[in-house]
Amino acid sequence: MTKAAPPSGTHGHDDSELAEFGYRPELKRTLGNFHTFAAGISYISILTGTFQLFYFGYGSGGPAYWWSWPMVFVGQFAVALCFAELAARHPVAGSVYNWSKRIGNPHLGWLAGWMMLVASIVSIAAVALAYQLTLPQISSAFQFVGDGTGTYDVATNAVVLATVLILFTTLVNAFGVKLMARINTAGVFIELVASVVLIVMLAVHITRGPQVVLETNGTGAGHGAGYLGAFLVASLASAYVMYGFDTAASLGEESLNPSRNAPRAILRAIIASFVLGGLVLLLALMSVSSLKGDKLSTDGLQYVVLDVLGPTAGKGMLWCVLIAVTVCALAVHTAAIRLAFAMARDNNLPASSVLARVSPRFRTPVVPAVVIGVLALAILVVNIRQPQIFTVVTSIGIIMIYLAYLGVTAPMLVARLRGRWTPAGQGRFSLGRWGLPVNVVAVVWGAGMTLNLIWPRPAVYNASAPYHWYLRWGAVLFVAVIAGGGFAYYWFVQRHRTGVLAEHRLETPVPAPTSD
């Protein structure tokens, strides 16, 4: 039996955008402006990304790799501006999926949603593994498997620590968005304060000038294109960090006044991440005692913090990094749940009626929280004896996120060129006449960085022995299989069942504007 739309009330305006999709409001609106901002910035997570990937960027491109941070920001900021305009118009769960479906078509929407969902599950596992980079450096007591010198000690211990974190994010998300928001907000506050403190403390200990970012350490020697080749590899360290800002919009059905708050949260999250993260990276290079040796390209920022601040203050800062990793994994898990719920509500996943079920007690989708947690745990197993394969899988996850973003920005550009795009009115966020050039930049950037990410470089996909062709070409092969196989399943099986499930459908959906 189809349920009638709820009477208009406090959230009537908030729910009007939801009604355009034919959905009735079910999730509990409790999140304020800072909550949505915190969700976006914790997904990007300044301390998680920079501490997890500095070693790779520095080892691949030397100090000059720093320039990839502003480069990636400019490209991703263009994407974020497009997303902010969409968030003002359509602040709904599973943002990327529903946006692609609305401005493109249902088939493209499904593919974008599928790519984002698989990538998000992989990202949960990848973020959780960052515990290994930090906890054993705080205390050797956290190296539960061996002493860290065995062939598989580090990889196996990383799985043990990551399992604990994923179990935690699963439980928190199963108990409702309010608990998640409280933990996430507290964690983000600590992360922001810690980032500022770290910047100040590094600045006090600088030993060289900012010209350090012009040094390449001879990293271009092994590339046919010289340092450009090295820089493109190193830029992946920044590309792997600056995404996930759409989470603020994906929580739109649980936010207050989301059409106004979500766009602000998206833009504030990426700008704050750029400024704070860029300063941390720059001052780390300016303050570390020596740019020689292997520690910078093996232990990364963790080594810099302990070297510059000393063991006591340094380990205190590493505890803050640990909190940042925790809330980052929590935010990624939260976003993945909303995406799975959004797709299942349209009967676009197997067992959709179960996945789309909202707990009457917690007013949140509990089953997707558990299923996604279990799948992320399963992915971790790959890392135990084949960490190189996990590196390939993680890179594939990032590639699929960039492709999913293209699944939004590309049809949005087509809609603009055909005169079919109308931004939200009533003083809400709009790019105005800048919409077309910004959208062009977003599409060109997304396509270019996707190509850079997927390029079969040994330095990225098979950096050490054993060397196998399938590792080097793993990104190309896996993305083709995941995208092609997934879409084949959708086309021949799931698309014939697609449609808003009766228990989630408005009795009288509001028709979508024909100009949109």
Image (cartoon, rainbow, N blue to C red):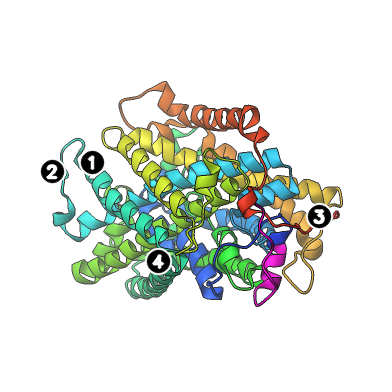
The residue type indicated by label 2 comes to: Gly
Mark 2 or mark 3: whose residue is earlier in sequence: 2
SS of the residue at dot 3? loop
The residue type indicated by label 1 comes to: Thr
Extreme residue toward the top, this view? 469
Rendering coords of residue 198 (x, y %) = 36, 71
Read off the magenta span.
Answer: 1-17
Above/below status of 126 relative to 472:
below
Rendering coords of residue 135 (x, y %) = 24, 57
Extreme residue toward the front, this view? 1
Rendering coords of residue 369 (x, y %) = 43, 52
Rendering coords of residue 116 (x, y %) = 55, 45
Q: Identify the residue at horizontal 17%, vertical 59% (top origin).
A: 139
C-alpha separation, residue under disc 4 versus residue under disc 1: 33 Å
Q: Is residue 62 magenta?
A: no
C-alpha separation, residue under disc 3 versus residue under disc 1: 51 Å
State the residue in front, 472 or 64.
472
C-alpha separation, residue under disc 2 versus residue under disc 1: 9 Å
| Residue 283 disc label | 4
SS of the residue at dot 4? helix
SS of the residue at dot 2? loop
Mark 2 or mark 1: whose residue is earlier in sequence: 2
Which mark lies nearer to you, 2 or 4?
2
| Residue 516 disc label | 3
| Residue 146 disc label | 2
Crowding near pointer 4: few (<14 within 10 Å), some, many (20+)?
Answer: many
Q: Is residue 184 visible?
A: yes
The residue type indicated by label 4 comes to: Leu
State the residue in front, 458 or 166.
166
Q: Residues at badges 2 and 3 in contact (C-beta under 8 Å)?
A: no
C-alpha separation, residue under disc 2 versus residue under disc 3: 59 Å
